[in-house]
Image: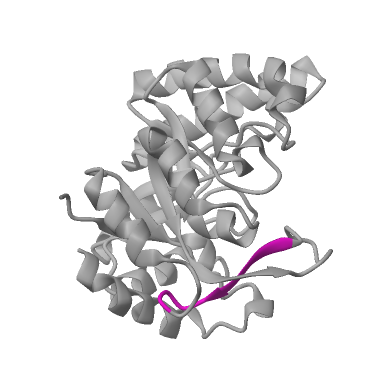
Amino acid sequence: MSSLEFSVCSIGLRHKRADEAFRIIADSRFKYADVLTYSPDAHLSIDMTPCRRQEVVQSAEKYGVRICSLAGIGGCNFSSQDEGLREEEIKKVKREIDLAAEVGATVIRVCPGEGEDLKEIRDKILPCLNEVTVYAEKRNILLGMENHGGSIACKPEQAVSVCREVGSPHLGVIYEPGNLFGALVDYKRGFTEQKEHIVHVHLKDGYPHCFGEDGFTPQRLSCTILGEGGLDIPWVLESLKEMDYQGYVSVEYESWHKEYGLPDVEEGLPRCMDYLVKWR
């Protein structure tokens, strides 16, 4: 069985400057980062100057951290009725692919449009996904659709259907058992359905909870420290090792969600690593 490489989703450090975020990741004994790229407080961005992007890479290297993946949301407009918006979104995703290649990442998150019903948006999103996947293959970058509410990938069988229709190993799934568990979807079955297409993994722990309309997905995971929630993490990690998974497992520590009552990231991330060390 393969060993597993663990990284940190830098969205959990979105309130920190990039340099400080990488220091905390390193102090928590992680060597890899899944770097936020899509918001005003992102640690990397396609809109940064090349000089500024290299400063971010050098900051990571200073602490012995490698940027292994990028967490963008390019692709949201693939489902738009406006052809011009879809074309602009294709250009945006291609720029994110270029950014990944520039900073040494191997995977980027891509959104397969907005909407959870594949039948309603299939004809719009497939041509877009085909085009960006061809481009990603040329740059040797993997694209992953995350199991997340609001997109067709919230249902594993839909994500698999899209992967099969595109038919390239460069388009796959970011397996997110916590999101599936929080949405009351069978994450173990989801793993079995998607395992041939998994290019990246996000990992968090907690219990399903209905938060209502608070600005995020109403039914979702109320997060805990890894090992303190209801997710069967040993099963997830052993299943990945048994399939000889070669990608990264990115810890998504969401202390920025104040409603979860998590310890600050400086305390929480080391405790997550304490739990994970036996799986290396």
Residue at the spot 45% in from the left edge and 55% down from the top edge = 202
Q: Quadrant of residue 97?
A: top left
Segment tinted magenta in the rendering: 219-227
Q: Is residue 249 above or below residue 139?
A: below
- Percent x, y for residue 264? 51, 83
Decide if residue 153 is on the left or right side of residue 103: right
- Percent x, y for residue 235? 35, 60
Q: Give the main secondary structure, helix, strand or loop, of the magenta stretch.
A: strand
Q: Is residue 55 above or below residue 49?
A: below
The verdict on residue 223 being magenta is yes
Q: Is residue 247 above or below residue 250?
A: above
Q: How many marks?
A: 0
Residue 212 visible somewhere in the drawing: yes
Decide if residue 114 is on the left or right side of residue 171: right
Residue at the spot 35% in from the left edge and 42% down from the top edge = 105
Decide if residue 60 is on the left or right side of residue 135: left
Decide if residue 8 is on the left or right side of residue 46: left
Residue 13 visible somewhere in the drawing: no
Query: Split into 4 quadrants, where in the image is the C terminus?
Result: bottom left
Residue at the spot 56% in from the left edge and 65% down from the top edge = 14
Residue at the spot 38% in from the left edge and 39% down from the top edge = 195
- Percent x, y for residue 279? 23, 65
Say which of 58 and 169 sits in front: 169
